[in-house]
Amino acid sequence: MREIAADRFAFGCHRFGFGPAPGGGAVDTERHVVPMVKAALDLGIRTFDSAVLYRATLQLGRALEILGVRPEEIRFQTKCLRYLGLAGEGATEHQPEALLTGIPARYQGLTDRWDGSEAGTESQICRERIELGGGKLYGVALHDGPDKEQQAGLDWEADIRPAVRMLQRAKRQGFVERIGLGVKVPGFVGRFVREEPGVLDYAGVTFCPAILHEMMGVFAEAEREKYEVTLMGINYGQAFTLTEDPAGAAPFLYNYAVANGAERELMSRFYRACGSTPLLHLAAAVAGLLVVNFPGVVTQIVTSTMTPGRLVETVRLVREAEVPAPVWAELKAMELIPREFPVR
């Protein structure tokens, strides 16, 4: 049993906006969101993670109101740079279809756009606070800078630095407590630290055992530069929930995009190395071991689901999931995880 306090967990709200609801279809606040928020609170979780892009904060705010929980009683962190705007006229929806099946009606016909200007960033974070229902923002992360670079090009002076200036101002005024990143590419964290020295309070990285080699470098840098690391989406979309060989499985999300051939082969190697140990258990055990072995650096695990029982199970697995010593040895021998990774 790994001793991991409830305050090391955060509940990820993205499925409040993207869905789908259990059984399929759009998410309903009273039927789907309220039970999830209550389950998180009952587990002792007090941090909720959202983003403008997630289309989720209004549902979270309404659920808190229904439950009689004031916004000041939780820690709310969100993300900016990506916002919802009009579809059409060349706008491109970058989210995979699997993440768009349960969007509530009020958000349909809108798509993701980018705005890193000072005014745009201010508008985005103020909207998030309004939709939550009040309180201050525990954290605001700059969202998916590498995606912007890949999809539309990234000009640091125009796309990142103005948002940083605005968030620094909001932090001085007490509106925002911490400035962070929310990214899928670990290498972007070091780039941000070099470009914006002394700014970063936390780096949220979409995580799974497949990127441990890269993440060990991030942990070392975080210790030097005095920022914290948040592990987000520890199953990498659906990759570490599969119960069959990924090489021949139906299409699945790997880091929130449909897995390509190389990613299928990589996941197949993990599957074969694990043998009878479920991939889900490996992902949970790795996350838990990181919190235990890097307590001053890895300070938060964000997990998301639409089923209360699944949330309870995920928290339990992070604390209790065991991976047999021969499996750890095989994973290291196959160079799937670093040899120096602590397994106790």
Image (cartoon, rainbow, N blue to C red):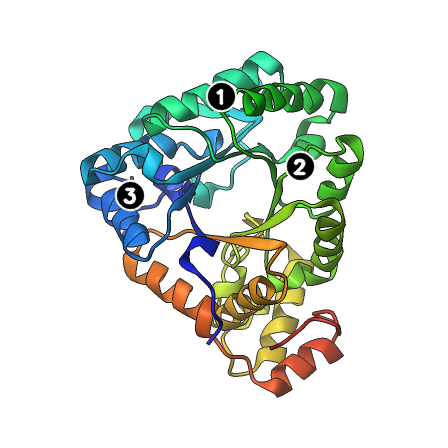
284 with respect to 221 (left or right): left
Q: Which residue is mark 1?
A: 124
Distance of mark 3 from mark 1, alpha carbons?
27 Å
Vertical relation: 41 (above or below) 114:
below
Write the residue at 55% across / 80% down.
Answer: 323
Q: Are marks 1 and 2 in contact (CB under 8 Å)?
A: no
Foreground pick, 294 / 187: 294
The label shown at residue 310 is none
Amino acid at dot 1: Gln
Q: Earlier in the sequence, mark 3 or mark 2?
A: 3
Specify whether residue 87 is in view.
no
Residue 97 screen position, x and y as percent: 46, 41
Q: Which residue is mark 2?
A: 200
Q: Please, what secondary structure does the residue beneath circle 2 have?
A: loop
Q: Which residue is mark 3?
A: 25
Write the residue at 36% across / 43% down.
Answer: 19
Amino acid at dot 2: Leu
Write the residue at 20% across / 37% down.
Answer: 68
Residue 80 screen position, x and y as percent: 54, 28
Amino acid at dot 3: Gly
Q: Please, what secondary structure does the residue beneath circle 1 have?
A: helix
User: Comparing marks 1 and 2, which lies closer to the viewer?
Assistant: 2
Q: Quarter holding the C terminus?
A: bottom right
Write the residue at 26% across / 32% down.
Answer: 62
Q: Earlier in the sequence, mark 3 or mark 1?
A: 3
Query: In the picture, residue 74 is in which quadrant?
Result: top left
Foreground pick, 68 / 158: 68
